[in-house]
Image (tube, rainbow, N blue to C red):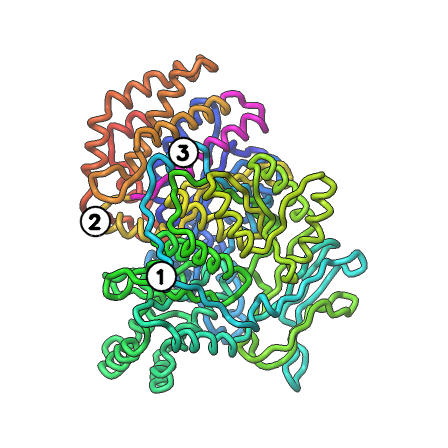
Amino acid sequence: MSDMPDIIYTKVDEAPELARASLEPIIRAFAGAAGISVETRDISVAGRILAVFPDVLTEAQRVSDDLAWLGKLVTTPAANVIKLPNISASQPQLNAAIKELQSKGYAVPDYPEKPANDAEKAIKARYDAVKGSAVNPVLREGNSDRRAAKAVKSYAQSHPHSMGAWSAESKTRVASMPGNDFFANEKAATITAAQAGGAKITFTPAGGAEVVLKDGLKYAEGTVVDATFLSARALRAFIREQLATIEPGVLFSAHLKATMMKVSDPILFGHFVSVYLEDFIAAHGADLTALGWNPNSGLGDLEKRIAGSATLEAAYRAAMAARPAMYMVNSDKGITNLHVSSDVIIDASMPAVIRAGGKGWGPDGKEADVLCCIPDNSYACVYDETVKYFKETGTLNVTTCGAVSNVGLMAQAAEEYGSHGTTFELPADGVVRIVLASGEVLHEHAVEKGDIWRSATAKKAPILDWIQLGIARFKATGAGAFWLDANRAHDRELIAYVKPALAAAGVEIPILDPRAATRYSFETMRAGKDCVTITGNVLRDYLTDLFPILELGTSAKMLSIVKLMNGGGMFETGAGGTAPKHVQQVQEENHLRWDSLGEFCALGESFNFLAEAKGKPQAAVLGAAVDAAVQGVLDNNRSPRGRVGQDDNRTSHYWFARYWAEALAAQTTDAALAAHFAPIAKALADGEAAILAELHGAEGVPADLGGYYHLDPVKLAAIMRPSATLNAIIG
């Protein structure tokens, strides 16, 4: 890594990738004027697939394993990475990406759902390394400090987004399992010096011989090791009960995370699908098996497979009509909550319902109250308390509310919750154990066929780093809490770390269970005060959508500063939950409403970090000018809007470049940079009419991107850089 670029900008998927094609040339041009190198590394789904199958590709088709390269980089002080949100691929998304690559001449194999031999098992293992949260555990070598820039928060308060009105009479509620879930069955322990070393996970079926599910595990002293399971039988009983007791006029919905929780949640999703259609499946199971349908694939896949069978189509329609109406992903296109597992992701779907005043769209295209099923009680209480809070207090006033930031424990794969190789669907009744090298059984559970068992870990060094970061942000913010439940096994182990660390620091920070912490945070922000939520990795993921969507209207404008534990820096931009809808709009009418404000803020922080870490004063000048440009975009209302003819992502990039150039031309810290950017600023101002005409003139017609997961670079550049005037100025 001797010829290390100054800044790495990631190539990802969907709307952030479209935006990159427009923004990155601007970044390269501006940074290059200061002798700062910017390079791209590919962590997209398609890029990750191609990287793990070099042996089936031609030499021209082969790509470098950029994720592995970045994984090494983030363990060094030289790391300076701007990470955009990538797809955490669900199985349907992975299958779609494979098909697209195959159609373009890449000889990657099909995904073997039921591998019949060692070769297919090896193929499946390669693909499974691409699925779910494949990127985050590799890159996140530091804990997360996620917050909105002051300018972003100020803008949201002065330009409030729409909020649905809450009523005390709302029938919207959150339902969770009465027990036998991951929360109830969790066990946890902190590894002692005597216990440190190797370990394995075993399964002993009733009356059978022990099978090793996972070998080669290593636990260092101080690591918190969890184990738990969710009962499939109890889950199905819970779903049946909710369907039977749902109130008339209330929409049925399930809120899971089948992308990041790539092993557990597609299975949970499949149970919702198969219980919802229980009678239909009972009557036509043989036909559905013959068609190769798996409930985990959802209703969308079912509809494709039964198409053309009048009998099955009629029976399906009747079965759907007999059940409560569902929360819709797209009412116009008939896409339900249970169509595709990756369409409804809890950290985006629940805030959307809450922001709308407890409403969701039904199949009739009208809003209605929603029954929100979140099976596991570990964090369902957060959303339950949020719904109850707003029923009691009414709609949040975004013009006066304080800001809620987050410090999240995520370094070194902390609490990777179902997205790892230690989650299993059990093939029979039996006992699952974690067995240490000494033979000691650390955890054990009696399970039934179909139960989902999982283990997660959090290492000592990341935990201690997280606590110190939490203390620092609490002092800077003025209020906050550790979100830890003394009644939960995992949290008790973390509390044992937190309490002495707080005592040693002489700081008093409340330790509240997630339900109490939720209410505390809302009460604090409603009073106009800022607060920080100090959480584990799951809540980091959930809360950094929940609060920003309510405060700012979107989580895309958030910035996560990751201070890597070995001294480098990673700057993550906002969430990509809405990215697929943005791509659809580009395909239909060539208007991209993705907001790059998160990328702008990350860029500024990256320059500031570079200035400090590598002693490059010009980087600091660029960073300060970025801040001025962000302020200009916000003050002049140049962020993307929803309709053709309005500002979109490309026009917002023009305005950002112009304000950035003007700030650099006006600054007096570096005369050479001022002289360089003065003519650029003038050209951008003089060319305003022509540039905007060229950018807007490209809109209103379908756009051919040359793909979805693997875009055609020539077509992408033509779509995202349609202004010859702007391109001539930028280069």
Query: Residue 425 lies in what quarter of the image?
Result: bottom right
Q: Amino acid at mark 2?
A: Pro
Provide residue 3's location: percent of width, then percent of height.
Answer: 55, 33
Which residue lies at the image location 30% right of the left edge and 69% below the top edge?
A: 249
Q: Nearer the viewer, mark 1 or mark 2?
A: 1
- Mark sitting on residue 249: none
Left or right relative to 16: residue 474: right
- Mark sitting on residue 154: 3
Which residue lies at the image location 28% right of the left edge and 34% below the top edge?
A: 651
Q: Are marks 2 and 3 in contact (CB under 8 Å)?
A: no
Magenta run includes residue 604: yes
Q: Quadrant of the C terminus?
A: top left
Query: Residue 724 lies in what quarter of the image?
Result: top left
At mark 3, the secondary structure is: helix
At mark 2, the secondary structure is: loop
Which is nearer the eye, 353 or 77? 353
According to the image, label 1 marks what residue? 169
First in residue order: circle 1 vs circle 2: 1
Q: Nearer the viewer, mark 2 or mark 3?
A: 3
Q: CA distance from mark 2 to mark 3?
A: 36 Å
According to the image, label 2 marks what residue? 702
First in residue order: circle 2 vs circle 3: 3
Q: Are marks 1 and 2 in contact (CB under 8 Å)?
A: no
- List the single residue furthest toward the right: 194
Which residue lies at the image location 61% right of the left edge and 36% below the top edge?
A: 475
What secondary structure characterizes most of the magenta part? Answer: helix
Q: Amino acid at mark 3?
A: Ser
Q: Which residues are magenta?
A: 593-618
Q: CA distance from mark 3 to mark 1?
A: 33 Å
At mark 1, the secondary structure is: loop
Question: For mark 1, does the 10 Å Cα neighbourhood hold few (<14), some (14 to 19), or many (20 or more) residues?
Answer: few
Magenta run includes residue 405: no
